[in-house]
Image (cartoon, coloured by chain):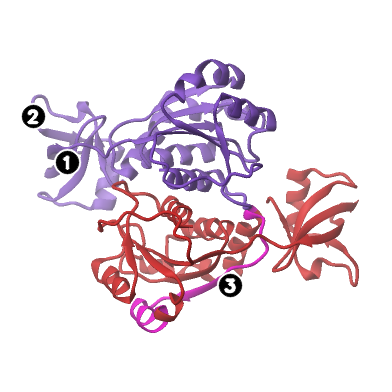
Chain colours: A red, B purple
Amino acid sequence: MNLIILNKSDFIEDTERVQIQDHRLDHIRNVNKPSVGDELRVGLINGNIGCGRITRIEEGKIEMDVALDREPPAPLQLTLILSMARPRVFKRVLSQVTAMGIKKIIIINSYRVEKSFWKSPVLEEESLNKYLIRGLEQGQDTIVPEVLVRPLFKPFVEDELPDIIKGTLPFVAHPYTSEQCPYNIGSPVTLAVGPEGGFIPYEAKKLIECGFSAVHLGERTLHVESAISSLISRLM
Amino acid sequence: MNLIILNKSDFIEDTERVQIQDHRLDHIRNVNKPSVGDELRVGLINGNIGCGRITRIEEGKIEMDVALDREPPAPLQLTLILSMARPRVFKRVLSQVTAMGIKKIIIINSYRVEKSFWKSPVLEEESLNKYLIRGLEQGQDTIVPEVLVRPLFKPFVEDELPDIIKGTLPFVAHPYTSEQCPYNIGSPVTLAVGPEGGFIPYEAKKLIECGFSAVHLGERTLHVESAISSLISRLM
């Protein structure tokens, strides 16, 4: 937790003072181990970033006076289209790409996605939110990404995707192609990443027909987490 | 396990036939679910890659006839100098960078490394080997990386590092610098990555004095795993 994310409800009415009473309290106590007068990095969810000076430490709460004087980092101009992953991996990827500054994440189906993944409670709003916030805390950002869930591949690609990619360069990670992923392309990007094992040829073909360029990262097969950060960091 | 790594001892004397009897057997049974005649990707440790055709499936063993006709992928021309990490994270990083094709990994100390990490059994040879092999299985490679452990920062940097970086461009990931990490530099690289929280100024200064360029990946703080794959993929 490199940044403590504050909610509007943490503020004591009409003041600059916040009271922290939930799981964030444990983190602050155990990791920051603060004394009264210490300053911590804080940010208001979907708002500014700044500094919180601790004014009171009690058994079940901590109080801080906060000054939120800086804007959060600029968003990464990259829309991520991601095949649903094994829930354990999905949670990590969600936090990871949020920490990297992505603001739009679209979860899609693909032939190689196990059907059971779609029943996972990880896709419920509360859970999504938890891993997005974790990513914001890691990346020191406050703007919660938008997450869309689209469990039908063909209607999504045919009906929604053409509008989504407008004004962006669209790439699909596809190991069975000859184009190496380009570097530093200096334009907004839409990036589609398939499941472990990749998109099947039909899916890759649909994406290419829609305007996507198929790119690879070399002969080696990377875990989805490693592949995603590699692709993002190279393109942007 | 995208590649089954074979050892010389798996071969039945003077033949092209191997017998698999250990934990790899469980993986093959549960994930590949093979029948006699099926072909699996195999590679001989520190040797060639090829194909294994299953000739026999019994209760406690599987036999394959193997043809090892391809060289493993070319090594990545990058030496990684990595601060010792929390053992749970260290294991994953070791597999991850092995999957990416790195062949020389040097584990160093740094002020922000918790002393207890150095006592972890993860640094024992058998354990290191386990996570390196896991990376090779993921990345479909056979060449085991060399791992050096150097628990004293100053003597390592002063006495060994000048020789290590010869013929490479050396970079240190350092968030408190103005240079953005460059793209696709087309030369062998030495990359030094500090612990969560980064190298302290003294350490960064020592590395810069040795010839390293300090580079960052932007305002956001990334987890070490995400930072490492981002840096490697951007530089190489």
| Residue occupying the point 60% across, 25% down | B209
Q: Secondary structure at mark 2?
A: loop
Alpha carbon separation for disc pair 1 and 2: 16 Å
Disc nearer the start of the sequence (1/2): 2
Q: Which mark is residue B14?
A: none
Question: Could you tell whether A6 is left or right of A100 in the image?
Answer: right
Q: Where's residue B198, x and y in %?
A: 63, 38
Q: Quadrant of residue A205?
A: bottom left
Residue corresponding to mark 2: B15
Residue B60 seen by the camera? no
Q: Where's residue A201, x and y in %?
A: 24, 67
Residue corresponding to mark 3: A125
Q: Do discs 1 and 3 share a chain?
A: no
Q: Secondary structure at mark 3?
A: helix
Q: Where's residue B127, x and y in %?
A: 43, 30
Packing grade of label 1 (10 A; few <14, some 14-19, many >=20) is some
Magenta stretch bounds: A138-161
Question: Could you tell whether B139 is left or right of B232 in the image?
Answer: left
| Chain letter for mark 1 | B
Q: What amino acid type should be assigned to the residue bearing mark 1?
A: Gly
Asked whether disc 3 touches disc 2, contact meaning CB atoms under 8 Å apart, the reply is no
Asked whether disc 1 touches disc 2, contact meaning CB atoms under 8 Å apart, the reply is no
A189 relative to B112, above or below? below
Q: Which tag is nearer the camera, tag 1 or tag 2?
A: 1
Residue B176 seen by the camera? yes
Question: Could you tell whether B145 is left or right of A75 in the image?
Answer: left
The one nearer the camera, A235 or B140, is A235
Q: Quadrant of residue A75?
A: bottom right
